[in-house]
Image (spheres, helix red, strand yellow):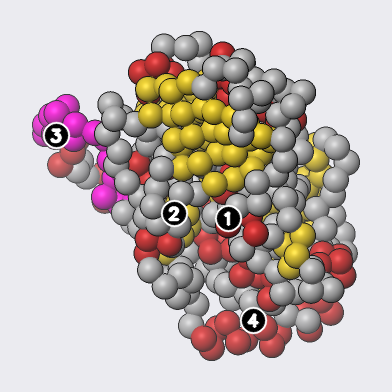
Amino acid sequence: MMFVTALAPAIRKAPEGFLSPADTAAVHAGRRSLLAGAFGAALAGLTKPAQAQAQTEDDPNIVVLPAHSKGLGQGVATNAYGVPSQFEKNIIRRESPGLTQVPQAGVSFCPLQSLFGIITPSGLHFERHHQGWWDIDPSKHRLMLNGSDERMLKRPMVFTVDDLMRLPSITRTHFIECGANSGMEWGNVAVPTVQYTHGMLSCSEFTGVPLRMLLEMCGADFKRGKFVLAEGADGSSMTRTIPVSLIQNDEVLVVYGQNGEMLRPENGYPLRLLVPGVQGVSSVKYLRRIELGDMPYGTKDEVIGYADLMKDGQHRQYTSIQEVKSVITSPSGGQKILLQGQHNITGLAWSGRGKIKRVDVSIDGGRNWRQARVQTPVMSKCLTRFQLPFNWTGESALLMSRAVDETGHIQPTYAENRAVRGSRGIYHNNSIQTWLVTPSGEVKNVQL
């Protein structure tokens, strides 16, 4: 008897850590010369399937019944809160060595290369903390609303979490991206995997109440009050200025729910602000106070950090919108293509200005582009999944994606971004990402 396996595993998952220094040096040394290679073979035959493997002997995994097919499994109460399979234990958030001096002011990166669709599981949502995370007793937490003077807000109010949960709620799906996502790449540093290049990005279904509704309950004067100050209850007292213009359309929410359950402590439990399309620091966690005022507040988190260092040495403030951006998540850095033949390029696109309109993919470093298939649903200020078939023949390839949003903004190259902003910045890097596929199938990060 002979059996045929349809498609053997074709891409090895990314390793747990960084590439070796030698590998990284080789990526830098060779990235320019790769553009001169021949890509005609890789462009041809995009629908050819991977070669099926015939087995001449019986596969014991098919013909021998395993223990789980002959006995009783574990009871329903074994895991009171569900956990992933033991075989998926390497799909976790990871810190970046040396990025911050203490873990309380650290970052954990989301494993984008291992996710499907657009929703990030709550336990894999990226973390960014300025003073560590807390598990706050919701019965003792309070949200206070006031004005910078009595003309701004007629009735200052204090809400408990229960008060907020009794109000009519809204559920929306949006991405949250740290303003420093891809920041290490600004300085021509090629970190190895998509988890480190783009992993300060996640997307969830959020439930809460519109901030505008709460302000109206307090008698807000939106003719006088043009900005709000959002303040967190963590040790850093994170504070951010948010224009009232973003609040008027009910997009800004005071959130208590994420992916159908209460927020996780590391994501701001019991309350956080959600400001869709704006850098993640504005979606203040452990939200304790909202103040309505008539001018930007210029707090420490808006003056010392989260400002763009421009090419001429000046700092640009309040550039908080996360511009149109995309990245191929598979094949991506740290992975290895094991078989020649048919593969599926897939990735994510997003824009803080609205919906994704189109995603183009190149396999020859931007010389030629093909329009990718955009997977539904396509929602405003939300991750969008794209796919394109790819027939790998063992030749070198340079994989790139370029997103266009509904406002007409097009994702720029590194050269276009650096021509305006230089190479010394940290924040708001939305440049096109390039992955090199070597003849051995290894996938590495390069910059073009």
Mark 4 to mark 2 CA distance (whole Å): 39 Å
Provide the residue span drawn in magenta.
70-88
Q: Which residue is mark 2?
A: 236
Which numbered dot is residue 78?
Answer: 3
Q: Which residue is mark 4?
A: 27
Evaluate if marks 4 and 2 touch, with contact meaning CB atoms under 8 Å apart.
no
For badge 3, the amino acid type reads: Thr
Mark 2 to mark 1 CA distance (whole Å): 10 Å
Q: Splitting the image into 4 quarters, where does residue 225 fall?
A: top right
For badge 2, the amino acid type reads: Ser
Residue visible at 62% across and 30% down? 149
Evaluate if marks 2 and 3 touch, with contact meaning CB atoms under 8 Å apart.
no
Residue 400 visible in image: no
From the top left corner, tell me how far across and down residue 313 is, in percent.
79, 74
Mark 4 to mark 3 CA distance (whole Å): 47 Å
> Which secondary structure type mostly characterizes the magenta part of the structure?
loop
For badge 1, the amino acid type reads: Asp
Which numbered dot is residue 301?
Answer: 1
For badge 4, the amino acid type reads: Val
The disc, 4 or 1, on the residue closer to the chain's N-terminal end is: 4
Q: Is 223 included in the stretch rendered in magenta?
A: no
Q: Splitting the image into 4 quarters, where does residue 430 fall?
A: bottom right
Q: Is 85 included in the stretch rendered in magenta?
A: yes
Evaluate if marks 2 and 1 touch, with contact meaning CB atoms under 8 Å apart.
yes
